[in-house]
Amino acid sequence: MSDATDTSGTGAGAGVPAPRPAPPSPPPLSPPPASISAGPRDGDLTAELEDAYWAVHDGAAAQATVREVLARLPRIIARIGRLAWRADRGATATVVGCQLASAAMSAFGLMASVAVLRELFAEGPTPDRVRAAVPQLLTVVGFLAARALLEAAVAVAQARVTPKIRTALECEFLRLTAHVRLEAVEDAAWHDEVHRANDRGLYFARQIVGQVVSLASAALGILGTAGVLGVLHPALLPLLLLSVLPVGAAAVRGARDRFRSFMRWNALQRRVRVFSWLLLDVDAAAELRSDTAQGALLAEHRGLTTRIAEEDTRLGTHSAALSLAGRTVGGLGTGITYAALGAMLIAGWLPLAAGAGAVLAIQAGQASLTRLVDVAHLVYEHALWVDDLLAVQEKCRRLLPRRSALRAPDQVKTISLEDVGFTYPGKDAPALDGISLRLHAGETVAFVGLNGSGKSTCAKVLAGLYEPQRGTVRWDGTDVAEMDAESVHARVACVLQDPLHLPFSALANLTVSTGTLTEADPQRVLDAARAAGADQVVAALPGQWETLLSKRFRGGQELSGGQWAKIAVARGLYKKAPLLLLDEPTASMDPPSEHAVYEAVLRGRLREDQITVLISHRLASVVDCDRIFVFDRGRVTESGSHDSLMALGGAYASMFTLQAGGYRPRDTTTGGTPKETP
Ligand SMILES: Nc1ncnc2c1ncn2[C@@H]1O[C@H](COP(=O)(O)OP(=O)(O)OP(=O)(O)O)[C@@H](O)[C@H]1O
């Protein structure tokens, strides 16, 4: 590969491009339809979801039977138990221990109640029977008091562990999502998954701890009751199940239905949020009003919210019908249970005291079982969301940038791209189609070309933000793909056209580029701010470096677009990275500021060996760059110095001449057309 590059020819001098096949032209554009869809509709969204990641859950929830729900519960309890154990061992052990003890107290209390009844139903005068029952009654009171204390201890321990689980899950979730590779983040399906996990997964992760505790308590309650009934008469056990299982089946169906409906609801809701956000956003306010577009957006918003309301009503009606059916069947089951108990008493299988005790136990068991069914369907449904959150975390781990012991060097002499090709996910045409170029320490190069020609993509490949599917990026001969990705990011400073407006102090807005919001190198900050022209911006702020740059906070200040751009350039310069990428950083600056920034970039560099890549549509600002690369449909079609490219008379020369024409003095004698320059 020639040092001057790929295409042109002669070092940093005259550019005689090597012949290349012309990039394919896009197909001719047909006229648009007369009626516009403002965005995907309900049907489209649901169809999209069916192909997406959600299909996995859909199958699981839609085919659940009572048995499957019950079979899944132990796994869910174990999973939540593990999360709790990791979050707070002491509190988790307290919850488990106190719950077991509380269930034992319930069972003993029930047995003591049967003993009370036995005394009351015994032969003899009533005062004697009551007196004889008093010790057993006191025992019942003792067991109930102990149970109340144990339940209070469970509640306290649960209050300790629940927020810790949520905090741990949230921190891990954000840590992972904030690090996944850029191309994964830009995938549309990613948004659905991550937002569902954030909105629902984290929310239900908090809910589910309490629900699992209730579930375990109900299950232990049933076990205790079943034990008591088994002692009284084993035939009572199947009767207990008969009265409650139908309610459980209806509840599971309801849960499954709600889950399905929520998927549609969530897709609609996301779209509604886009409209609400646009209608509320300060930045959109001026354009919305000048375009008188509020009415159209409100109509779209109303259409979507109406659909959501219809979905809610449909679901509510369906759930009520299901619940009624379940309770009807459950009521029949209870009737059969009591009829069978009566028959057992008549047949003399049970003494009357045991029969009365059985009624108490069956009522307690029914209450526990109904609670279990209710909570089980909630846990079943909410566990899907928690599973979803954990699955997204797992997916994030697979999408993290590569880790390697080989770290990017802090000093680099040459960065080269060799036949690099990159296609965005879901796109057919490559954004970069065989780019080869070589950049040297200390030089400033420019990427120019028409919109969509691949300049920014090439910069992102250089920054290690995208991994090319074809070709190689080398730093001093070492393939970047072998280096630790984050160490590469740490050695590249990127200044983009729409820089982040961070709601931090002016100082933290600079230091963040070195990965800290709390520590600054004062002289370096000052140098970077001066070079970018941000020093005057900061000097004019009421609290100077300490000023919070956000109107959303009390005492915060808002900057203009150009002022933010200067802060962003200063942020990039402060990093003092071996590679500095400036992607149209001065687009919103006034002419003196723009001039000052280019002066700083070209001459007042903070680091002599820095490679600077400048992307700009204002060709006057790239004239002094060491070399200029002209992009066209993902390829570099010309390269060389300004003079050599002008001499070449190709695309660069015609773009430059066109722009320069706008600045020539008007010739009043020719009706205002610019005078020809000699
Ligand atoms: N995040 C993305 N996802 C999918 N396609 C993208 C993405 N970003 C850019 N593209 C496409 O890749 C091609 C190159 O875009 P790129 O932004 O690199 O061009 P550019 O030369 O920087 O354009 P501009 O001068 O308008 O900033 C374009 O066809 C664009 O539509």
Image: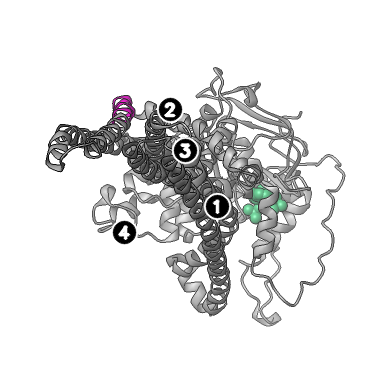
Which quadrant is the N terminus positioned in? top right
Q: CA gap, disc 2 to disc 4? A: 46 Å
Percent x, y of residue 123: 22, 36
Q: Quadrant of residue 170?
A: top left
Q: Is 91 covered by the magenta stretch?
A: yes
Q: Are marks 2 and 4 in contact (CB under 8 Å)?
A: no
Q: Residue furthest top?
A: 405
Percent x, y of residue 131: 12, 37
User: For the residue labelled by badge 3, is the local secondary structure a helix, a strand or a loop?
Assistant: helix
Can the viewer see residue 269?
A: yes
Q: Mark 4 vs mark 3: give the one in front.
A: 3
Q: Mark 3 vs mark 1: give the one in front.
A: 1
Question: What residue lies at 78% left-to-right and 48% top-to-bottom?
Answer: 429
Q: Please give the range of residues in magenta.
A: 89-102
Q: Mark 2 vs mark 4: give the one in front.
A: 2
Q: Quadrant of residue 388?
A: top right
User: For the residue labelled by badge 2, is the local secondary structure a helix, a strand or a loop?
Assistant: helix
Q: Earlier in the sequence, mark 1 or mark 4?
A: 1
Q: Earlier in the sequence, mark 1 or mark 2?
A: 2
Q: CA gap, disc 4 to disc 3? A: 31 Å
Q: Mark 3 vs mark 2: give the one in front.
A: 2
- Left/right placement of residue 95 relative to residue 600 reads left
Mark 4, residue position:
557
Q: Earlier in the sequence, mark 4 or mark 3?
A: 3
- Determine crowd level at label 2: few under 14, some 14-19, many 20+ residues with C-alpha closer than 10 A: few
Mark 3, residue position:
173
Q: CA gap, disc 1 to disc 4? A: 57 Å
Across the whole image, how many numbered discs are drawn on residues?
A: 4
Q: Is residue 660 above or below residue 608?
A: below
Q: Which mark is residue 82?
A: 2
